[in-house]
Image (cartoon, rainbow, N blue to C red):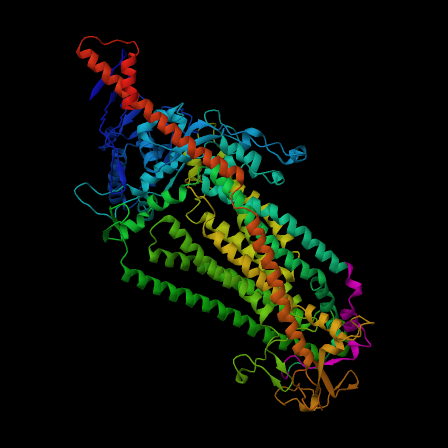
Amino acid sequence: MKRITGKTKDATLIEMINKADAHVEDGFAVLTGYRKTLLADNNGILLSASDRGTSLPGLQEIHKLGHNKDSVYFSDGERRIDFVLSYIDDKDGDKKAERRREFEANLQKAGLMLETQDKWESDDGKTYYLKIHAPWEVLATYADVLKIKVPFKADDIPKGRDVPLAWLTCPFRLPPHIMKPEPNYFTAPFDKSKVDFFLIGNQETFFPPSTRNRIVYYILTRCPYYKEDRKEKDKTGIKRLLNNGTYTSAYPLHDCSYWKEAKECESERYHLYKHWARFLSFYKEQPLNLIRKYYGEKIGIYFAWLGFYTEMLFLSAIVGVICFVYGLLTFGNNMTSKEICDPDIGGKIIMCPLCDKKCSYWKLNSSCLSSLQSHMFDNEGTVFFAMFMGIWVTMFLELWKRRQARLEYEWDLVDFEEEQQQLQIRPEFELKCTGRRRNRITQEMEPYLPLTSKCARFCVSGATVLFWTCMIVACVIGVIVYRLAVYAAIASLMKDSPTSKIQLLGPLITPQLATSITASCINFAIILVLNFFYEYVAIWITDMEIPKTHLEYENKLTMKMFMFQFVNYYSSCFYVAFFKGKFVGYPGKYSYMFGNWTKLRNEECAPGGCLIELTTQLVIVMAGKQLVGNVQEALLPLLKNWWSSRKGRSHPQGQYSRWEQDHDLQSFGQFGLFYEYLEMVIQFGFITLFVASFPLAPLLALFNNILEVRVDAWKFTTQFRRPVAAKARNIGAWEEILNVMAILSVVTNAFIMAFTSDMIPRLVYLYAYQPVHEASMTGYINNSLSIYEITKIPLENRPDDGENPTWFNESITVCRYRDYRYPPGHEREYSHTMQFWHILAAKMAFIIIMEHVVFVVKFSVAWLIPDVPSDVKARIKRERYLVQEYLHHYEVEKLKMQLSQSFCVTSEATDTCSLLPPSPDQQDSLSVCV
């Protein structure tokens, strides 16, 4: 111990330095050196922890009045605050205080420096703030442990040629210092023993704040809070202390306020808000490098993917609008709708009842409006758009792989996966898995989960997933029952109404339309309710399985949540697209849900097909989800932001501390980014799986995503505390999910065009059942409707009108229904005609041809577009070559210095040591040794 006393009596500095080497024990590095305590006399600024009645030699309290608190530094203005812990005194204070003392003592043993702010200095008068600083020794040690890449040489590869007409993109560009906050370097994993190998200009700024808080958080999650004589393995990590209320929050600091620039630090938050988070910048590019530098690679890769996805939506939205406009332009040439709406054709065709007893006979022209609406989405352009989207999704995924590969190189993530698998073992796994076994690769003892426990947990997990999946199916069946019951009720009311009222409301509010809209709204409400439960169920199941690494945990949670959300959001659309109207039967032999005893007849499609109902379902669920999501993400936080901004700006200049401002913000949470991905992937399913029914879906997604990028940016910069920086080389399990959905979308759209749309039956009629010289759709409606005698309808199916009803002053003897069956009196009456089999064969042929064409183009495009750009491959090879070359040169020079020193020592022994270079003979000896 050294006591250093100045010339004045105002202060005394006591510095204790222990230069013992660092060592790593049980995954938690304990630096036994580099501890410093600042003390002062009664008139000084700082008081030691011992003056407060504690025994922590490195803990300090701020007593300086008038100090500028809006700072990211300790009270000395030199040591940067890398992390902040907050806590309050409560009824269980003694027990929690003991945990805090042990935890903070162990943090100091790890080499961290601590400074606390008493509650009377905080804004609320009850919260303590513990500020943590990691000195160079700690940062260097853990950068070596975590193999963090740092620069060792400036990038010397020439830049590519300038893009022609690049000036056209100037309005969309951001200033160069925002897009490129750092110069390009070649990097290598940090090695503490080779410090002079790297480009270290200033030790305090060599590691950026994002890396610093990542290292400190790594220490916090592995630091124990038990005494040395009591090895209680479960008492480890800041997460457990947060769960039991010992600390109320743990977070790194933002570097400044988002509304004003700070002079003492980088002010990266201010620049992000100014150039990225404001909605008026929606047409500007994103500062991805600055996002990555400030928030870390994991958040940076999310915004890179979201921005790229939004850019690719431009093309699909344009093509979708063109197809929709084509449907509008050909609106008047649709012969099918003309025949349905024609009083002399559709007005004279009497249709069979759509439900038992309550539903009456109805005229075909009452469905005129729905048939006109259906043509806007069910036309020749829809086939082209469905095939185009199959190719578009491939282009999107392949081009994203190239973009991702470039980001992997630029952000030093090329070799990250291996180190993450080895190092990022979850503390929960280490605590819950008491068994130990030797790793075959590292030959070190490590925790493991026995096979019997794995199987038991897997069975419970599988049973839970199956139960909740069945719950969703039950809810869908409930909605179907609602559709049947409400349809019968509405049809009964309209049947009992006066004739004039039926004529007025029939074309505008049909039972099909009213039932479809209300059922879709109810289904969307059920989706929102079930989502609330799925979140907790999926997290509980994943926690129960005890995944080993953070990556494994995220992948398992991703798969479970997506499975729940997939069934929840898409089940109703799958029902309308592939089941409704497919198993109806015919008058006299209808099919019933769960058997004849239920009296719930399967739903039929309107004469124009079920595609318009699928469109209605898709629009309500997709648009409703986006609307509710934007209200939750933007409107509600906006009100909170208004209040917090008033509070922050109403304080005197510099008296509302940076750590208190961040404490008042929302915690980002462990699954914050997970839900952002989930929202976008569910949207991706809507615009790919069922896009054949609604070509405007990409346009809605584009508008939503333009808003989503800025809303998410605004939340990150103004609403959330700064997240702990985390690395990720790609979007994780979401990439595999997108690939599966891309393949599934080709199949679903092919089946929608074949079985849900009326395109194939119309084409078969046009080319196989019409004379060649006519080639028109005249007579298609009459051809697609079969005939049934009313007298043969069973009593349980017959409407209440009676056996020979008089309806609209007309006597009804036969009714029509949508199918291809032989008429009464035919030797094969009510059995399928040859046209039915021709149409079925055409549908199957269309599915096979469309799938093969799209898949051939899809895989050809994937083969032609390499996953990694050629210039990126060259840069990766160049960097690896330089690392080897520079390391070899460094080791050679180091060895020469050692040998030179040994020659000098020998010369000293003979009293002939000289500062002159070694003689030629000595140089030869050095060369031989090297």
Reply above or below: 369 against 700.
below
Quarter of the image that includes the C terminus: top left
Image side of residue 706 versus residue 641, left or right: right
Place of residue 868 in the rendered image (x, y in percent of width and height, measured from the top left): 51, 43
- Residue 201 lies within the magenta run: no
Q: How many marks?
A: 0
Viewer-nearest residue: 414 or 673: 414
Q: Residue at x 72, y 71 (%)?
A: 762
Q: Is residue 244 visible?
A: no
Reply above or below: 59 against 723.
above
- Start and end of the magenta stretch? 329-357
Q: Residue at x 28, y 60 (%)?
A: 451
Q: Is residue 573 visible?
A: yes
Viewer-nearest residue: 664 or 388: 388
Place of residue 839 in the rendered image (x, y in percent of width and height, measured from the top left): 67, 74
Viewer-nearest residue: 3 or 272: 272
Place of residue 118 in the rendered image (x, y in percent of width and height, measured from the top left): 33, 33
Image side of residue 570 versus residue 492, left or right: left
Quarter of the image that includes the N terminus: top left
Q: Residue at x 59, y 47 (%)?
A: 310
Reply above or below: 521 against 798.
above
Viewer-nearest residue: 711 or 179: 179
Place of residue 466 in the rendered image (x, y in percent of width and height, measured from the top left): 42, 67
Quarter of the image where one finds residue 381: bottom right
Image side of residue 22 versus residue 629, left or right: left
Image side of residue 517 versus residue 42, left or right: right
